[in-house]
Structure formats: C-alpha cells, structure tokens
C-alpha cells in the first residue's frame, strides 16, 4: 500500500496500509469460482474490469458522485513516504497522465495529453514526448518539459535532500531536456529501462517538486498552484475545497479542461469509518462502496434498492514483512523457518473464504495472478509445515524446549507482531500466524497500535519498530521496476525488511534493460525466486475487488488494472 506510490495505474507497489480488505463477497455474479471439497472457493474466474462500461454519449450530464476515504491525506505529494492509497484515488482526477492503462494491463499514449510518444534511440535509450498543445495547468501554465525535469531531479535519488519513497525508473534517467520547444520533452537514460512509461503517470507541476522544500511542503495541504493558495489541476476536475474538520474533499469541473467535458458536476470524497461503509451506502450517503472483504458491509450495502454488486480480479497483495535488521529475524534461517510455519491457505480462507471470495495463495513478490509473467515461484518452500520449520530451526542450532519454544544460547525465540488497530484482516492474520508459529517453536506476541500512525511510527525504514507485521502492496501494470525497491538496496525507502542480496542490484539492472518481453519475463522469474529467498517478505494472497454501486452508475467501479476516464463517469438514469 514504498512508493511504489508513483501510480496505482502504472506501478506495482503503491503501498497500502490497508486496515481492512479490498473486495470480497459472497454475493458476486456467477460463475466466479470453483469449489473444492472443503466448500471454500479455490480458483478465480474474474474479469479484469467489472464496472458497467457505457459510451459517454449515454451518460447524462450533471450529478454528483460521493465516495469514501479512510482519512484525508496527510500529504498531497504521492511520492512522499506518508502518502496513501486514498490520495492516489483523489489525485487521479486532477493529475495528468501521458499514458493510459487498458483492461489487460497494456499501455497506450493518452491523447488528452500526448501528441506523440516514441523511443527515438535504444542505445542510449531516448524517449521523446510531445505534449498536446492544449494541455495546460488550470492556473494557465502550459504543461512542459520543466514539469518532467523537476520530477526527475526530485525522484532520481541523487540528492539526499529529497526523500521520495521510491526512485524506481527515475534512477535510470540521465537527463530530461527541452527538445524543439517547451512542449517537446527528451528523456535520456543512463541505463536502459523497459518500464519507462511508468514515469509518465501522475505528473506534477514543476513548482511542486523543484526544490527539496517544495517537495516536502508545497503540496502538504493540497494541490496548489505556484501562489500556494489556489488549487490547481490538469485533469477534468479540480479541487474546490478541503474540509479537514469534516473530512471531506470536494472536486468540481475544471473550467480550463480542454478535453471531453466531465459528465459529473462534482465528485466528493468523504471520510467514513470502515465499519460504517455499508450503512452509509444504504443511507444513500455514498454512491459506490468498496466492501473491503467485510461481510457486514456487504450485507448492509445490499439492503439499498437499485444497486449492483461488481467484482473484478484484484491487485491488493497481502504479505508478511519480517524485520531482518535486528532481533531473531536477523538470522536468515530463522526467517525461513517462520515462513515455512505460516499456512497461507488457512490465512486466505480465514480472510477471504468467510465471505465467499476466491481463495488462492500468492506465489510471487513481483506479479499477481492474472498478470502476464505470474507463476508460483515459491518452489514449495512456503509449505505451511510446522515440522519443516522446526527442522530448519534445529539445523540452525535452536532447541525446542519443553514449553514448545525454541532456545539458542539462552535466548528464547520470541517475536513481536505489530498490527494496526481496527484492521480486521490484519488482526485475523496476526492471530493465526501467532498460533501457527507457536507450533514451530516461536513465541509470537501481538501488539496492537493506533492505525493512524501504524505506518509512520512503526513500519518506515527509519523506524522498523516491529519484528513481523502485515500490510498490502497494490500491484499495477509495470511491476518489475518498482518491485526492486522492496528488496534492493537496503536504504531504498521501501525495503522494510532491511536486508538484501547484493547481486540483486546488477540482476535487476539487466532485467530492467531487457527490452525483449519474453526474455524479460524469463529473467524476472529468476529474480523473483531470489527475492523470495530473502524471506523478508512472505506473500500471502491477493484480494479480489468487490464493490456495491448504484445501478445507474457508469464507467466507474472495480478494476484490476484499467484506469478510470473520469470525464466519462456518471449516471445513465
């Protein structure tokens, strides 16, 4: 859910400190899954995009769409380590993207912003972007090469005064320069990078990132123009107001928008607690709700008349993260044993099966099921076997005591599982993991901490105030480049486990530089296996995305990869 926060539409790795689930339901359309002898769904047959797709000519003009957020963003800078998935959803309405992602995860130039987009040289790799002549920030400033150049300087990792959560792809860029005119952008790479389109999403105006101080503070409280007071946009909507007391962000039509006009008058993001989502939808306070795997939310939401349940394949990848920098998990053998002790199928059934969602364990730390390149690369090591785990511990010199807890040199094998308060899914995972690990010789205590600062106070790479924890990554259409930061280097800003295999750096360089798609996937499989062998991230399962929406809502809802064309969202009734 890190950043991996460059764009959920484009990058695998928007870090989501998800305090519940993202999309499971027993009431989804059929067929959705096959059922094994246990009665639990075991395989998924879900579409990549599940919203009701309607030509914009059939969408009526006017109306308001109200959606929920867990909390207002702590910052409106997506690549800030304290960013959130909620911010990504909001910013998609006003930040420009020069590429679009289709239902199958493939990309294409976005004609609203892009006049042309070509790779003009492969050695060195040079990408030329010609910005559409009409593309303009709502304060009247044209989109230009300066916007991309400022982002490159902020996100390439060479200036320690900037603190981006991810430098993915930007770190391989040598320069961003002006071409024939201000709207002609030349991006020259020091290292070939096949995921270069990932740079061209959620682009900032230059003044928001052109200095370290601006990166930290210019968009701290909202997406502002250079004057620091006027909200700015280069999308079909612009922020009208941010009410921090009420927890509401309201966006209206952008009067400077040059593309197809937005059908909706306003889009409102309202802070709603997870346990109130279903009732808020039933009370017509929300127009679409992600049920987040909570059966009570689904039941309450479906009580409203004139609604539809929609379910798509998922991108929310649940995992366990082990802190390899200190304590018992500094020993890779202990990390391996812990990973072996975790029965991931039981966890998936407990979290997903109770609401009838497809249950499938995740076998990769780069790809998700349904994505080209996905395969189970765990090699059977993540066996869910207490016996296998005990054997690994004993081989590393640990002795299982009469109380069932392993000891070595007088040290008991204890670990602290840090879980955010109010996170039903994580609470379930923590409880089951502690039980499973106990059978293998671990004494795991669960510490529940405030959800509001779970990430910033406990998980970030400068804190790592945990032994084991659980949150989710959100996969996207360009997973390879961003996944690197999870494992290499140790100070990447997203490597929460804190250890690495030094050879991963050169191997990821080769992987990123491979432009042949088939060869690239072969290399990715090897890198995936070796990253898994660090045992700092234990992949668990992916959550399908399930929503309950107004039946007359069009062109918005659950989707695995496809981005929303916000000017086409609206109602048909």
Image (spheres, grey):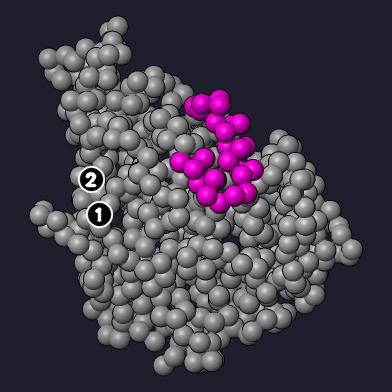
Contact (CB < 8 A) between labels 2 and 1? Answer: yes
* Label 2 sits on residue: 345
Residue 187's place in the image compared with 528, above or below, is below
Residue at (19% x, 28% y) in the render? 386
**Mark 1 packing: few (<14 Cα in 10 Å), some, or many (20+)?**
many
Residue farthest to the right, as pictured? 180
- Position of 321 compared to 495: left or right? left
Residue 413's place in the image compared with 137, above or below, is above
The span shown in magenta is 499-525
Of 495 and 219, the residue lying toward us: 495
Residue farthest to the left, as pictured? 37
- Position of 563 compared to 468: left or right? right
Q: Quadrant of residue 408?
A: top left
Residue at (77% x, 52% y) in the render? 121
Residue 504 visible here: yes
Of 419 and 568, the residue lying toward us: 568
* Label 1 sits on residue: 359
Residue 201 locus on image (x, y percent): 63, 60
Residue 316 locus on image (x, y percent): 40, 54
Which labelled disc corresponds to residue 41? none
Residue 214 visible here: no
């Amino acid at each position: 859910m890190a950043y991996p926060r460059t764009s959920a539409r484009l990058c695998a790795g928007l870090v989501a400190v998800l305090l519940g689930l993202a999309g499971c339901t027993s009431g989804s359309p059929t067929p959705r899954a096959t059922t094994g002898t246990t009665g639990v769904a075991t395989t998924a047959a879900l579409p990549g995009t599940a919203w009701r797709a309607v030509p914009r000519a059939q969408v009526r003009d006017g109306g308001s769409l109200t959606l929920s957020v867990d909390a207002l963003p702590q910052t409106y800078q997506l690549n800030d380590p304290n960013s959130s998935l909620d911010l990504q959803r909001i910013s998609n309405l006003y930040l420009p993207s020069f590429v679009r992602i289709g239902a199958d995860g493939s990309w294409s130039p976005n004609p609203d912003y892009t006049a042309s987009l070509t790779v003009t040289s492969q050695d060195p790799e040079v990408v030329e972007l010609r910005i559409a002549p009409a593309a303009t920030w709502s304060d009247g400033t044209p989109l230009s090469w300066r916007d991309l150049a400022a982002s490159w300087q902020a996100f390439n990792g060479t200036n320690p005064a900037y603190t981006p959560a991810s430098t993915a792809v930007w770190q391989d860029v040598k320069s961003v320069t002006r071409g024939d005119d201000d709207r002609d952008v030349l991006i020259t790479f020091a290292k070939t990078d096949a995921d270069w389109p990932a740079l061209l999403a959620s682009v900032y105006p230059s003044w928001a990132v052109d200095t370290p101080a601006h990166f930290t503070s210019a968009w701290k409280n909202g997406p502002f123009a250079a004057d620091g007071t006027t909200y700015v946009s280069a999308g079909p909507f612009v922020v009208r107001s941010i009410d921090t007391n009420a927890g509401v962000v309201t966006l209206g039509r952008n009067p400077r928008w040059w593309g197809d006009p937005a059908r909706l008058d306003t889009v409102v993001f309202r802070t709603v607690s997870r346990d109130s989502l279903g009732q808020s939808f039933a009370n017509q306070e929300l127009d679409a709700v992600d049920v987040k795997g909570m059966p009570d939310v689904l039941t309450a939401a479906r009580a409203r008349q004139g609604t539809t349940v929609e379910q798509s394949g998922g991108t929310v990848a649940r995992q366990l993260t082990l802190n390899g920098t200190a304590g018992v998990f500094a020993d890779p053998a202990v990390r391996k044993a812990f990973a072996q002790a975790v029965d991931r199928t039981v966890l998936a059934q407990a979290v997903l099966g109770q609401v009838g969602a497809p249950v499938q364990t995740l076998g990769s730390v780069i790809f998700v099921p349904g994505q080209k390149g996905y395969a189970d690369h765990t090699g059977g090591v993540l066996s869910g076997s207490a016996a296998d785990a005990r054997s690994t511990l004993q081989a590393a010199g640990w002795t299982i005591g009469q109380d069932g807890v392993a000891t070595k040199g007088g040290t008991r094998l204890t670990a602290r599982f840090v879980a955010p308060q109010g996170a039903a899914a994580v609470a379930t995972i923590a409880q089951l993991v502690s039980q499973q690990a106990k059978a293998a010789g671990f004494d795991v205590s669960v510490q529940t901490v405030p959800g509001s600062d779970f990430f910033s106070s406990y998980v970030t790479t400068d804190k790592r105030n945990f032994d084991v924890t659980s949150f989710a990554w959100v996969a996207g259409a360009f997973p390879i480049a961003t996944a690197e930061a999870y494992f290499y280097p140790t100070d990447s800003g997203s490597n929460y486990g804190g250890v690495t295999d030094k050879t991963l750096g050169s191997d990821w360089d080769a992987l990123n530089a491979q432009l042949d798609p088939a060869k690239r996937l072969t290399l990715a499989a090897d890198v995936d296996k070796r990253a898994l062998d660090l045992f700092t991230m234990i992949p668990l399962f992916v959550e399908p995305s399930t929503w309950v929406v107004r039946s007359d809502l069009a062109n918005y809802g659950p989707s695995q990869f496809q981005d929303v064309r916000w000017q086409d969202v609206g109602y048909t009734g």
